[in-house]
């Protein structure tokens, strides 16, 4: 596929960055990689979290901690050029069109931020460029 694309996308809902599969994918294609879908949902959100990818964590603090470790792990891979959090807003408790009803959002259904997560995202994102630059110098 390498001759037909500029970047390879990869979705993953594990609790840690999938370093080994991404290394293999990059070695095979020679192309940069974007992690285009990942997220963590928490049981303390009040949402059912019964439909959708990934296992729920206990709290919003856990979501923030997992985000920090996950994207730091991505930034330490010099061939990873970006990531995309799934999704901006939580899904409705009654489920969206496909039944997903999970706490994936940076904001809740009323557009109020999950503060612990949003603040950690700001902190982590502000240091990722330096982390990524160091990874490229190794």
Image: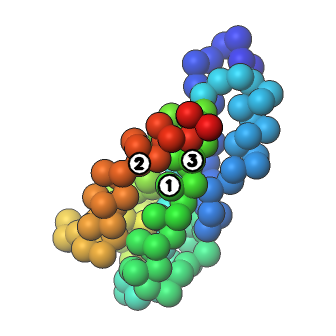
Structural distance between the alpha carbons of marks 1 and 2? 8 Å
The residue lying at 71 percent from left, 22 percent from top is 30
Is residue 122 shown to the viewer in this render?
Answer: yes
The circle drawn on residue 76 is 3
**x and y percentages locating residue 67 in the rendered image:** 47, 64
The circle drawn on residue 128 is 2
In the rendered view of the protein, which quadrant contains the N terminus? top right
Residue, disc 1: 71
The residue lying at 53 percent from left, 81 percent from top is 57
**x and y percentages locating residue 77 in the rendered image:** 60, 42
The residue lying at 44 percent from left, 53 percent from top is 85
Is residue 34 shown to the viewer in this render?
Answer: no
**Nearer-N-terminus badge (3/1):** 1
> Does dot 3 land on a helix, a strand or a loop?
loop
The circle drawn on residue 96 is none
Q: Nearer the viewer, residue 42 or 20?
A: 20
The residue lying at 65 percent from left, 24 percent from top is 31
In the rendered view of the protein, which quadrant contains the C terminus? top right
* Badge 1 vs badge 2, beta-carbon distance below 8 Å: yes
Position of 24 with respect to 69 (left or right) is right
Structural distance between the alpha carbons of marks 3 and 2? 9 Å
**Nearer-N-terminus badge (3/2):** 3
């Amino acid at each position: 596929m390498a001759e037909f694309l500029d970047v390879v996308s990869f979705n993953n809902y594990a609790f840690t960055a999938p370093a080994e599969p991404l290394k293999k994918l990059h070695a095979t294609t020679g192309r940069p990689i974007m992690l285009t879908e990942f997220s963590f949902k928490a049981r303390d959100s009040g949402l059912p979290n019964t439909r959708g990818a990934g296992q729920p964590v206990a709290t919003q603090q856990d979501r923030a901690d997992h985000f920090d470790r996950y994207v730091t792990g991505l930034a330490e891979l010099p061939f990873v050029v970006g990531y995309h959090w799934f999704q901006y807003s939580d899904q409705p408790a009654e489920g969206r069109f496909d039944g997903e009803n999970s706490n994936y959002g940076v904001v809740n259904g009323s557009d109020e931020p999950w503060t612990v997560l949003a603040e950690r995202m700001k902190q982590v994102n502000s240091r990722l460029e330096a982390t990524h630059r160091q990874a490229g110098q190794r």
